Image (cartoon, rainbow, N blue to C red):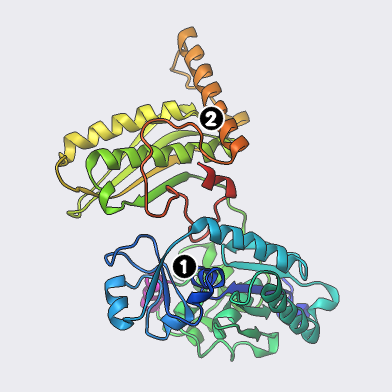
Amino acid sequence: MTLTPPEHQGLRWLFLDLNSYFARVEQNERPELRGRPVAVVPMMTDSTCAIAASPEAKLYGIKTGTPIYDAKKLCPALTCVLARHDVYVDYHHRILKAVDRILPVHKVWSVDEFDCELMGQQCHFDTAILLAKRVKQMLRRDVGPCITCSIGIAPTSFLAKIGTEIQKKDGLTVIRPEDLPDILLPLKLTDLPGINVRMEERLRRGGVKTVHDLWNTSPKQARALWGGVQGERFWYWLHGYDVPVPETSRSMIGHSRVLDPDLRYPEKAREMTRRLLAKATTRLRRQKFYATRLYVSVRCLDGRKWTTEHQFPAAQDIFTFLEHLDQAWAEMNTRISPSLSRPFFKKVAVILHGLSREGYVTSDLFQTETPEGKTRQEKRARLSAALDTLQDKYQRETVWLGARPKTQAGHVGTKIAFSRVPDREEFWN
């Protein structure tokens, strides 16, 4: 592969990172929260943690992951707001539409991060700056006055993302080839995308303690430090070479949930687990996958954790998965003997593995399918399809299997993950 030196390609990428996204959406929706310290929480209890903090709350040292009990000590005037993931997904699409009016969005990295590829005259310094300012204006005009972003412009998407870290609050940073490496040297290793605390420690053990040290490694040294080709890619991205990001394929579909206090009893926890599995299988069918393995995990209030995995012929219907979940739950009951009279569970999770498309599903050579079994599977497939049709038609759940647990947040299992933005349809079921 021939790589173009950064000085020959100029400014190629614009990266946009929304500021304090969840909290700023809440302030945009509720004018009475503007200018006040706000923390977005998954449930209204002091034992939970903030999943987002407004700029005003950050001034008190409150950030993502801060326990609310501690946050209220840091800022007695803190307002806690229950997370509304459906609203944040709606804003996400409104923001994409607004940005697209100025520049086509190339890739969505997360709910609050995207990049745009610059072409032709757009790669010139003055033009790129003008486009970035127009994007900011469009967000304020078409989405709301509280929706701000940091923008980085650079030869690579990776460096452009680093630019958003250099000026985090409504910033605009341009990293030109001639600015390297000086503009990066004041940063900490953990300011670089992909380097967390664990990776930082690994680099330190390899003799790399600063960004300066990392810059002065070779591609082969970086590969050895990372233990694979990703380290070599990282080196090229850092040095301004536009190496493509390899495409990944989906390997699992799942949901997890930290249980509300009144859902921590064994039967309530079981109902929630079944509910999460129903949502996962709906996503499985919507994306036209089949699964061959079900992973179940429960975490108890006393710190114990139990996991199991069931394997079966490729399936897509909810009834097959529920059968295996019931077996797994019975298995768990015999292992950890939960008390029925008091709260026992803290978190439950289900994950569907072994995904394949319909055309790639293979039968088990050692399994003989009977006519009765085939008829049963066909009935289950039709019933599952009927449930999906009703949900799509009415854009809400009209028929469900078993009890439907109520939660403070309203949406069961559907939440925004680090690199996954839920489909709007997921909030219907």
Q: Which residues are magenta?
A: 196-206
Q: Foreground: 280 or 233?
A: 280
253 relative to 112 in the view: left or right: left
Residue 47, relative to residue 384: is it above or below? Answer: below
Q: Foreground: 185 or 397?
A: 397
Q: Foreground: 203 or 78?
A: 78
Crowd tier of the residue under label 2, counting other residues whose Cα lies within 10 Å: few below 14, some 14–19, many 20 or above = some
Name the residue type under label 2: Leu
Query: Which x, y percent locates residue 44?
Result: 33, 62
Q: Which residue extends farthest front?
A: 32
Residue pointed to by mark 1: 226
SS class of the residue under badge 1?
Answer: helix
Query: Mark 1, mark 2: which one is toward the viewer?
Result: 2
Residue pointed to by mark 2: 387
Name the residue type under label 1: Trp
Query: Which x, y percent locates residue 30?
Result: 52, 70
| Residue 199 located within the stretch drawn in magenta | yes
Is there any visible trace of residue 255 in the rendered image? yes
Q: Residue sitting at 46 percent across and 67 percent down? A: 226
SS class of the residue under badge 2?
Answer: helix
Residue 429, relative to residue 15: is it above or below? Answer: above
Between disc 1 and disc 2, whose residue precedes?
A: 1
Is there any visible trace of residue 105 in the rendered image? no
Q: Which residue extends farthest top?
A: 371
Q: Quadrant of residue 334?
A: top left
Res. 24 mark: none
Q: Residue sitting at 46 percent across and 13 percent down? A: 373
357 relative to 65 in the view: left or right: right
Crowd tier of the residue under label 1, counting other residues whose Cα lies within 10 Å: few below 14, some 14–19, many 20 or above = some
| Residue 28 located within the stretch drawn in magenta | no
Q: Residue sitting at 54 percent across and 63 percent down? A: 229
Q: Quadrant of residue 293?
A: top left
